[in-house]
């Protein structure tokens, strides 16, 4: 199915993808604002291309086919009624903006194969509860979970080494953050304005703290200074 084939089809409400389809073009269904349901009858599609369902604001019933191995950027961006999604095993990377502003998204099940979450991947998913992050995940990109106000707690796997800038910025409901040995970098503004966060226990694996990592964390009462820490960006302080 070619790029943009059904883009801006304003009256399209449902679509069944035949089992013979092997490839979808970019923006195939973008801005189909009445589209509610898309069903794949086969597992031959290996890639969900960029902007596939971008701004399908009424899409609420969708299951990623088990055959999918890669996902493009902004595939589900602004899919405002999508409530849950399971990312199939085999997917290693969630790209930039993939679920940005999916404002009713509450649950995401991530595969054990995931190694990287891209920038703005879940930005402004205001109802999203913290997903279980798999062992093997190494990087959380900048602003990946920024603005997720419903998130109460997050536990990081041992494999995680980098938490990008503003990754959890404005997660105002976040009260608990659980680190394990392995994280080395907290980039600038990583937990900025997490106003419910009261205590942080940083692991001894931390070597670098960016500027204003905890700026605006007005309830923060306790934080430790890891013995391994060898670089703190003091410009503007970390608080």
Image (tube, rainbow, N blue to C red):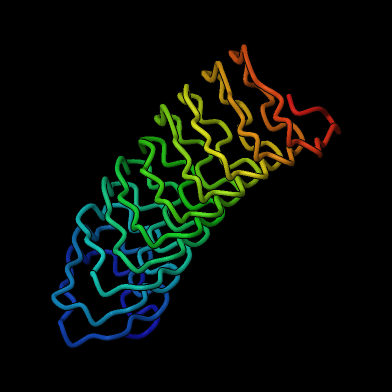
**Residue 181, relative to residue 117: is it above or below?**
above
Residue visible at 51% across and 18% down?
Answer: 196
Residue visible at 62% across and 30% down?
Answer: 202
Q: Position of residue 24 (x, y in %)?
A: 33, 80
Q: Residue furthest right?
A: 235
Q: How many marks?
A: 0
Q: Position of residue 120 (x, y in %)?
A: 53, 51
Q: Quick check: 5 left or right of 188?
A: left
Residue visible at 53% across and 40% down?
Answer: 146
**Residue 99, relative to residue 226: is it above or below?**
below
Relative depth, front residue between 194 and 10: 194
- Quadrant of the image containing the N terminus: bottom left
Q: Position of residue 174 (x, y in %)?
A: 47, 26
Q: Position of residue 118 (x, y in %)?
A: 53, 57
- Quadrant of the image containing the C terminus: top right
Q: Quick check: 138 left or right of 233?
A: left
Q: Quick check: 91 left or right of 88?
A: right
**Residue 139, relative to residue 157: is it above or below?**
below
Residue visible at 17% across and 68% down?
Answer: 39
């Amino acid at each position: 199915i070619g790029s943009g084939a059904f883009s801006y089809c304003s009256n399209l409400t449902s679509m069944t993808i035949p089992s013979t389809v092997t490839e979808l073009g970019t923006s195939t269904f973008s801005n189909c604002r009445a589209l509610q349901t898309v069903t794949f009858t086969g597992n031959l599609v290996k890639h969900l291309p960029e902007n596939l369902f971008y701004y399908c604001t009424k899409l609420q019933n969708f299951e990623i086919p088990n055959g999918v191995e890669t996902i493009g950027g902004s595939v589900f961006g602004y899919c405002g009624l999508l409530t849950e999604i399971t990312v199939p095993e085999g997917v290693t990377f969630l790209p930039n903006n993939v679920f940005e502003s999916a404002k009713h998204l509450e649950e995401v099940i991530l595969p054990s194969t995931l190694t990287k979450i891209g920038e703005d991947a879940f930005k402004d998913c205001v109802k999203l509860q913290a997903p279980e992050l798999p062992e093997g995940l190494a990087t959380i990109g900048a602003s990946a979970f920024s603005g997720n106000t419903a998130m109460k707690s997050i536990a990081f796997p041992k494999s995680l080494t980098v938490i990008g800038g503003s990754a959890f910025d404005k997660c105002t409901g976040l009260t608990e953050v659980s680190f394990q040995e392995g994280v080395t970098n907290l980039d600038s503004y990583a937990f900025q304005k997490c106003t419910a966060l009261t205590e942080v226990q940083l692991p001894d694996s931390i070597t670098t703290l960016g500027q204003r990592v905890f700026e605006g964390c007005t309830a923060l009462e306790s934080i430790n200074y890891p013995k391994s820490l060898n670089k703190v960006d003091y410009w503007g302080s970390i608080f």
